[in-house]
Amino acid sequence: PASAFGTRFEGGRARGRRQGVPPRMLDDVVAGFAAGFIGTLLGYPLDTVRVHQQAGAATAGARESLASSARQLYAARGLAGFYAGVTVPLLGVTVINTLSFTSYAQFRLLLGVPPRPAQSSASPPFQQFDARCAVAGALIGPLAAIITTPMDLVKIQMQQANQPRTLAAVRALFATGGLAGLYVGGPVNVLREVVFGAGYFGAYEFTREKIGALPPAASIPIAGAVGGVVGWLVMLPLDTIKTVQQSGSVRPGEVPRAVDIAARIWAAHGARGFWRGASAAFLRAIFVSATRFSAYEWVKIRISGQSG
């Protein structure tokens, strides 16, 4: 018998069909929304700590540990400091995850990757890993960057306490740099999103294929955690450059080039400088990605009997 959730959702699917929305796409939208909201809310404190660590990557000084950075943040701003600027990503990341998971499913279809078969709580049958999954993930990058560039800029400015309120931050950034000011860090962010999408979804699919004998309750969060770590592993140097670039002024003529920031980071800390905030990033990736993929796949199974 259908679950209560699935039964209630059938009305929405029927309305979507009448309006010309493919049911499978509608399932991806709902599942992606749930994944983005839950993952963002739970993982935000570690993201704030990561940003504080990365923001100083281009300046000389001792490298702060995860615990030390968290203590300093708490001493300066209390518990609320860990959720500074959360409104923007809570809304924005929810939107971007809806876009990402939906686009990923559609790119998979366009590239000819077959969908997984319907499954229950039993171990699902899996095919060999298809490298086109990583390509589908990479194709999300340019689309995602349209949203994540201004979203990250506002979030980072607020996390650095440059602006206390979301609307005030947006107005100040726009007044200073215009529309272009909201897209500071855009080029490096496009590349960052491309490599992240390839690593994130590619590693997830590869891991699920390798541990397919496990029940979904175990294989999905494990594969999600691996996907999150691999995604952050390949993009963290680019993310550090972007964070430094977006931490400063957005006034025209005052924004340093990404290549110059990379040179400053190397001069100040060597290769290790590009990995500032790695502990917080990886811990958050394990926790958030395991939760995010679990929420996505759980909702998909409840709605349609299929995972991603």
Image: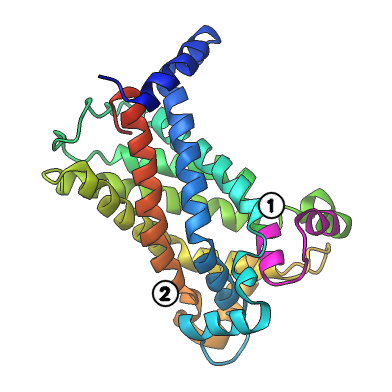
| Label 2 to label 1: alpha-carbon separation | 25 Å
Point out the residue furthest to the left here. Answer: 213
Mark 2 / mark 1, whichever is N-terminal: 1
> Which residue is more in the foreground, 128 or 42?
42
- Residue 71 seen by the camera: yes
Left or right position of 25 against 84: left
Task: State whether residue 154 is above or below residue 79.
Answer: above
Q: Is residue 167 magenta?
A: yes
What percent of the width, then of the height, locates residue 42? 48, 57
> Which residue is more in the foreground, 294 or 58?
294
Q: Residue at x 43, y 44 (%)?
A: 138
Q: What amino acid is at disc 2?
A: Ser
Q: Which residue is mark 2?
A: 279
Q: Residue at x 52, y 7 (%)?
A: 18
> Which residue is more in the foreground, 188 or 284?
284
Q: Secondary structure at mark 1?
A: helix
Q: Which residue is mark 1?
A: 150
Left or right position of 3 against 87: left
Q: What amino acid is at disc 1?
A: Pro
Quarter of the image for the C terminus: give it: top left
Task: State whether residue 10 is above or below residue 139.
Answer: above
Point out the residue furthest to the top here. Answer: 18
What percent of the width, then of the height, locates residue 83? 61, 64
- Residue 110 seen by the camera: no
| Magenta extent | 154-172
Q: Residues within 10 Å of mark 1 (few under 14, many from 20)?
A: many
Quarter of the image for the N terminus: give it: top left
Task: State whether residue 161 is above or below residue 174.
Answer: below
Between marks 2 and 1 in the image, the one whose residue lies nearer the viewer: 2
Q: Secondary structure at mark 2?
A: helix
What percent of the width, then of the height, locates residue 232? 42, 61
